[in-house]
Amino acid sequence: MTSLRPPKAVVFDLGNVLVRWDPRLPFVGSLTSDEVDAMFEEVDFAAFNHLQDAGRPWAVALASIRERHPQHAAAMTLYRDNFAASLAGPVPGSERVVRDLRATGVRLLGLTNWSAETFPHAEPAAPVIGLLEDVLVSGEVGLAKPDPRIFRLLAERHGLDPEATVFVDDSAANVEAAAGEGFDALLFTDAERLRADLAERGLPV
């Protein structure tokens, strides 16, 4: 699309947009890849992780694992304790996009699905996060994408006009939810494609 007026704000998801995240990395040297896959399937890691993103305390989460999947309690505790290892550094090219946008004066914000307890590891792994005006962290507010309420909260908290705000996420479900709330939502695949999409919207990047 080509906008007559450039966006006033760009909101970034963090995981696999600004910082690489691979939940299998904390188990390197402790479990084989097949063992991790089997464990993730048994505990339904995607659903487990979503509850963490939505604000469930890790103490509660591990108590649930000990009750329902005691054979995986030690491994899931390892995941929590070694969470920093799951962050494999900045996503290639994304920091340059953020810095170029910042030079234009457009507002830059973050909206991330992330446990409040592990979020402090984010910026050390990808310092570009510190260039954002603010990050709304799902685990801190008890709402997680693609829940439409978190997009409404984002707009309310930061005084955003969704139609004048680009939202960037690597999850199609999250992009669809943001679009449903009126945001100009982009699916992130790589920094080069993002740069082209932002240029189409009139941002000089």
Image (cartoon, rainbow, N blue to C red):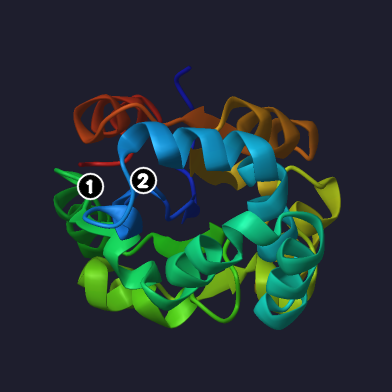
Say if residue 157 shows up in the picture. no
Location of residue 57 with respect to 167 vertically, above or below: below
- Residue at 62% in and 45% down: 45
Residue 79, x across and y down, in percent: 45, 65
Question: Mark 2: few, some, or many residues within 10 Å (few <14, many ≥20)?
Answer: many
- In this figure, which residue is indicated by the disc labeled 2? 17
The numbered dot on residue 91 is 1
Is the C-beta separation of discs 1 and 2 under 8 Å? yes
- Residue at 55% in and 33% down: 171
Q: Amino acid at mark 1?
A: Val
Tell whether 130 sits left or right of 111: left
Residue 151, x across and y down, in percent: 74, 53
Image quarter in which the C terminus is found: top left
Q: Looking at the picture, tell me which residue is in the foreground, 72 or 18.
A: 72
Q: Where on the picture, by quarter, is residue 46? A: top right
Q: Looking at the picture, tell me which residue is in the foreground, 169 or 6.
A: 169
Residue 12, x across and y down, in percent: 45, 52
Cα–Cα span, label 1 and label 2:
6 Å
Q: Secondary structure at mark 2?
A: loop
Q: Looking at the picture, tell me which residue is in the foreground, 3 or 63.
A: 63
Which tag, 1 or 2, sits closer to the chain's start? 2
Question: Mark 1: few, some, or many residues within 10 Å (few <14, many ≥20)?
Answer: some
- Residue at 79% in and 62% down: 143
Say if residue 61 shows up in the picture. yes
